[in-house]
Amino acid sequence: MDNLFDVLVYLDENLVRNLSSLVLTGYIETTTLTQSFDRTLSAGIRDGDKNENFNQGIYTKTEREGYKDKNSQQSNNALINYHVDRDFDAKQCVKEERQIKTTYTTFVLNGNLINHLNKNNQLHHKDETDIEKNNVYTGDLIEIEGTITNECILTYIDTLTNLLNIFGCEYLNSLLQKKETKINFSMFLKMLTYLQEILKCNNTLDLIMKTGNGTVILTVNKDNFMNGQCNIFDKINCHCKVVGKVIKTCSVESDTISLLRKTGQEKFYENFFKKCEPLLECLTRNDIVIPQCPKLRLEQCAIQIMPLNIYM
């Protein structure tokens, strides 16, 4: 970024890695070389003599009448044994291990990616006049500044659901005039509870950023905010800078952006909220404060961005 003191508050790591793999070359490589040596040397010698000598002498004399026998026997055994044993054994074992680690530092990749996009004129710097003049196109990578507001369809539904639970549907239904509407507060609460589950799916939500007369819808994931101990609305009404990919515009008359598109039935739920307006009017008549509903469908001077990062 141009300003070294810009604070990174949001970073979509997966999107940064994917784009970096397309436009950047090189990476941080760490090579670890490990060698171990094992030498064994053994030698031995055995020397021995063996000398054996055996002498035996036998003399026998036998006398019989008319005969004389005389036997003499002598034997000598000599055994000489000499032996020498020598052995020599030498071993050497060399073990070599090579480990290569490829380390990707997301913050470095993010900075390199932004610098690359700026250098190659692939990052378009836009302002409020570009949105008003429809000078922003789907698929563009843009950098734009503005102020994030506290308008959010999910927080509106959360607040309204809490309000109905506090007063109780039985009491609120008693305030309704006959034939005022076919929908009562009990039905309204059930639908709001179901909508909450859909809009909270995958931990994503829409933030609304104002830039002059233009509106920028930032589709963010709560997990990508740098400080998980803070609420995303802690920095509401603060000036920020957004780098992201444009995924929808209202440049064509028929193009619109609905805050209820995540339901897959945006027109149905928009009509449902319209049918429930008498219920909200009933609350106001009975001096019950209600939250302000954001504009559910943006039809002009609006774009939708998938942010890579948000700086403040």
Image (cartoon, grey):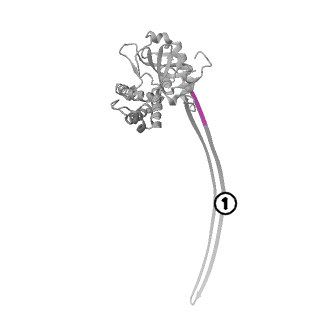
Q: Which residues are magenta?
A: 29-34
Q: Which residue is mark 1?
A: 49
Label 1 crowding class (10 Å Cα cut-off): few <14, some 14-19, many 20+? few
Question: What is the residue that sits farthest to the bottom in this orientation?
Answer: 65
Any part of residue 126 in sight: no
Question: 124 and 273: which one is in front?
Answer: 273
Examine the rendered structure and indicate whether residue 168 appears above or below residue 294: below
Residue 154 percent across, percent down from the top left = 46, 29
**Magenta stretch mostly in which secondary structure?**
strand
Image quadrant where one finds the N terminus = top right
Q: Secondary structure at mark 1?
A: strand
| Amino acid type at image mark 1 | Asp
Residue 110 percent across, percent down from the top left = 54, 22
What residue is rendered at 66% in x and 60% in y?
A: 49
Residue 155 percent across, percent down from the top left = 48, 29
Examine the rendered structure and indicate whether residue 283 appears above or below residue 74: above
Q: Residue 240 falls in which quadrant of the image?
A: top right
What residue is rendered at 47% in x and 32% in y?
A: 158
Locate residue 73 relative to residue 192 in the image: left or right: right
Image quadrant where one finds the C terminus = top right
Examine the rendered structure and indicate whether residue 255 appears above or below residue 63: above
Locate residue 120 relative to residue 263 in the image: left or right: right
Task: Judge whether residue 207 is colored magenta.
Answer: no
Question: 123 and 145: which one is in front?
Answer: 145
Any part of residue 36 in sight: yes
Residue 264 percent across, percent down from the top left = 36, 28
